[in-house]
Structure formats: structure tokens, C-alpha cells
């Protein structure tokens, strides 16, 4: 184990050499998990093992509930509470035409920008791949923090390249009510990603600025730091993805976001987005022993 600088700041994280694939059987529809505990926090779903041999065409992500197509951009607007006051919140989510190899699996790279009162506060690259069963896996993130237009640091985690990190599922191939909760991945400190999910409702109707959608799937999410009984709710429209984000329980942030715009970027716009997003990789100049992200079709 060795210490490496993750970003060009004083933040240090633990990294280790890449691990090979695991031969353990992988559940195709989640993993057994205890029901929420009666303690101060929700139970965390069992961490999953990923099998690189089960990813023949991993960057074709056509899961009907969360398809990810390069050049797709979704914009969400709403509010969240900051020190008890509602603050305008905007999220821009762009699927890039860029791939990266993580733990022997080629992943598709997405770029998310998070704004409060029109000020960038967080930017991240997220890494997803679809297995042969149709599950979408989450293999890691690079996250940056910004304050008043200034980059102030960040962190990263990737399965197989940072000690203790585990992949997780972001969307099941066939999400159904009653399916056990499943891990969205795990990363130890300093990133500390512990998100878990389960199906909360199906067949909902949702109206947002972008349109009215029926047969909506609702996924509830929680993490180890969440107070028991507090969940983030994500509303998925078949063939589109997330159309609304809400909450249930006494959430101190009370985050509410709605889809306001969806578009397909032109070749020029996508190239500009790619250039800006990959600056995050340039700043995160060391993260384990992964190879740099590359344009689709450029080889790895």
C-alpha cells in the first residue's frame, strides 16, 4: 500500500495496485440485505463482487430505465436547504463520448456539474458499465469541490485500484418491488461512498417542466451517514432516466430537483464538453494505476 496524491492539493488518499477479477458469483438482481435497522442509521446493503468476464459490451448502456447515450445532456433545477434557507440548485448531467478501463472493464464516463445560486460547487466524473445481464454497475468517481469559482480540492475512488473499494449497481436489469436492497458501491475514507438503494414504488405519474410521465419507477437511496428514516428518492422514466429527485423523512437538505431540459449535443458541443470534463482528469493526475480516459473508438 502506498500514499499517492489524488488531486493537485494536499489531500492524500490510499491507493494500491490493480486487483484482478473476482471469480465469486455475482448476483444479477441485487444482493441479500437486512431490513433497515432500528438503530440511528439505515442498514447498508451487502457489498457486491464484480466479475469482469461478465462484461462483453460494457459501454453500450441500454438498460430501459437508465439508458446512457454519448452526447445526451439532462438539466435539472430546483432547491435545497443551506443552513435552513432554500437555495436555487441546478445540475447538468452529460454523457461523454469517452471511455476508461477500470479493473479490467471498459466504462463509459459521465460528467456532472452541480450549481448552487449559479455558482459551481461540485464537478465529478462517474464511471459506469453494463453487464451481460443488463445491470448498470458503478465502478468509481473523481469528485472536485469548488468555492467562488476556485478549485479547492477533491477525491477519487475506483474499484480494483484503491484498497477496500467495491463496485455497486446503479440500476438493476429488472427492478421490482420487494427486491432486496443493493449496494451502489463502497469506498473507504477519505471519499467514503456508502450508498445503498432499493425499489420504493412503481407505476407512478410525475409532472415536471420537461413533461408528464407515467409508469415511473421510484428508487430510494440512503448511506451510512443518513439518519434512519431519511431517503433520497429518484424517479425514473422508462427510456429516459431520472426525471425528478426528491426525499422522504426528516431530510435536513430537503433537496428537490426536476428535469427541465433534455438535449442531444452537437459534435462541436460534445467536443467542448469533453475538453472541459477531461480537465478533471488532468487535475487528478494520479489515481492508482489506471490509464487515461480516451475517446470512444480510440482504443485503450
Image (tube, rainbow, N blue to C red):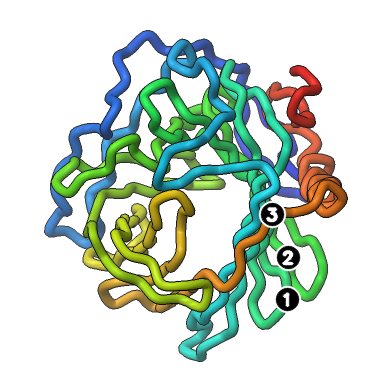
Instruction: Please name whichever residue, 226 or 32, is drawn nearer the observer in this view of the structure.
Output: 32
Give the spatial CA distance, label 1 vs label 3.
Answer: 24 Å
Picture residue at 34% right of the left edge, 53% below the top: 224
Question: Would residue 43 appear left or right of 280 to someone viewing this image?
Answer: left
Q: Residue 174 falls in which quadrant of the image?
A: top left
| Res 218 seen here | no
Q: Residue 261 falls in which quadrant of the image?
A: bottom right
Which percent across, then down, holds residue 283? 82, 45
For the C terminus, the image quarter is top right
Residue neighbourhood size for the residue with mark 1, other residues' Cα within 10 Å, grouped as few (<14), some (14–19), many (≥20): some
Question: Considering only vertical position in the picture, is 292 above or below 148?
Answer: above
Give the spatial CA distance, label 3 vs label 2.
Answer: 27 Å
Judged by depth in the image, the label closer to the viewer, 3 or 2, is 3
Which percent across, then down, holds residue 7? 76, 44
Residue linked to disc 2 = 146
Which percent across, then down, holds residue 256? 44, 76
Q: Which of marks 1 and 2 is nearer the N terminus?
A: 1
Q: Which of marks 3 and 2 is nearer the N terminus?
A: 2
Question: Considering only vertical position in the picture, is 184 above or below 265?
Answer: above
Secondary structure of the residue carrying numbered label 3: strand
Picture residue at 23% right of the left edge, 60% below the top: 203
Residue neighbourhood size for the residue with mark 2, other residues' Cα within 10 Å, grouped as few (<14), some (14–19), many (≥20): some
Mark 3 and mark 2 residues within 8 Å of each other at the beta carbon: no
Badge number at residue 119: 1
Which percent across, then down, holds residue 94? 66, 53
Mark 1 and mark 3 residues within 8 Å of each other at the beta carbon: no
| Res 30 seen here | yes
Instruction: Please name whichever residue, 12 or 76, is drawn nearer the observer in this view of the structure.
Output: 76
Residue linked to disc 3 = 264
Q: Number of numbered discs present?
A: 3
Judged by depth in the image, the label closer to the viewer, 1 or 3, is 3
Amino acid at each position: 500500500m502506498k500514499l499517492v496524491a489524488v488531486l493537485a492539493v494536499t489531500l492524500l488518499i490510499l491507493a494500491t495496485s490493480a486487483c484482478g477479477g473476482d471469480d465469486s458469483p455475482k448476483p444479477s438482481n441485487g444482493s441479500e440485505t437486512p431490513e433497515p435497522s432500528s438503530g440511528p442509521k439505515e442498514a447498508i446493503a451487502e457489498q457486491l463482487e464484480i466479475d469482469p468476464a461478465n462484461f462483453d459490451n460494457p459501454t453500450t448502456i441500454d438498460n430501459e430505465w437508465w439508458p446512457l447515450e454519448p452526447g445526451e445532456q439532462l438539466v435539472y433545477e430546483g432547491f435545497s436547504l443551506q443552513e435552513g434557507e432554500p437555495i436555487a440548485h441546478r445540475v447538468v448531467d452529460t454523457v461523454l463520448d469517452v471511455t476508461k478501463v477500470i479493473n479490467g472493464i471498459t466504462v463509459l464516463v459521465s460528467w456532472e456539474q452541480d450549481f448552487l445560486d449559479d455558482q459551481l460547487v461540485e464537478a465529478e466524473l462517474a464511471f459506469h458499465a453494463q453487464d451481460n445481464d443488463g445491470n448498470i454497475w458503478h465502478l468509481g468517481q473523481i469528485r472536485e469541490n469548488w468555492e467562488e469559482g476556485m478549485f479547492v480540492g477533491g477525491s477519487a475512488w475506483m474499484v480494483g485500484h484503491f484498497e477496500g473499494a467495491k463496485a455497486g449497481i446503479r440500476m438493476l436489469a429488472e427492478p421490482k418491488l420487494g427486491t432486496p436492497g443493493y449496494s451502489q458501491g463502497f469506498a473507504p475514507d477519505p471519499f467514503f461512498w456508502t450508498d445503498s438503494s432499493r425499489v420504493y414504488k412503481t407505476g407512478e405519474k410525475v409532472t415536471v417542466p420537461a413533461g408528464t410521465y407515467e409508469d415511473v419507477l421510484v428508487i430510494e437511496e440512503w448511506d451510512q451517514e443518513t439518519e434512519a428514516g431519511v431517503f433520497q428518492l429518484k424517479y425514473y422514466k422508462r427510456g429516459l432516466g431520472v426525471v425528478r429527485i426528491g426525499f422522504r423523512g426528516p431530510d435536513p437538505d430537503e433537496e428537490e430537483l426536476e428535469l427541465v431540459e433534455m438535449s442531444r449535443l452537437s459534435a462541436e458541443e460534445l467536443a467542448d464538453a469533453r475538453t472541459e470534463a477531461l480537465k478533471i482528469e488532468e487535475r487528478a493526475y494520479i489515481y492508482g494505476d489506471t490509464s487515461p480516459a480516451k475517446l470512444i473508438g480510440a482504443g485503450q
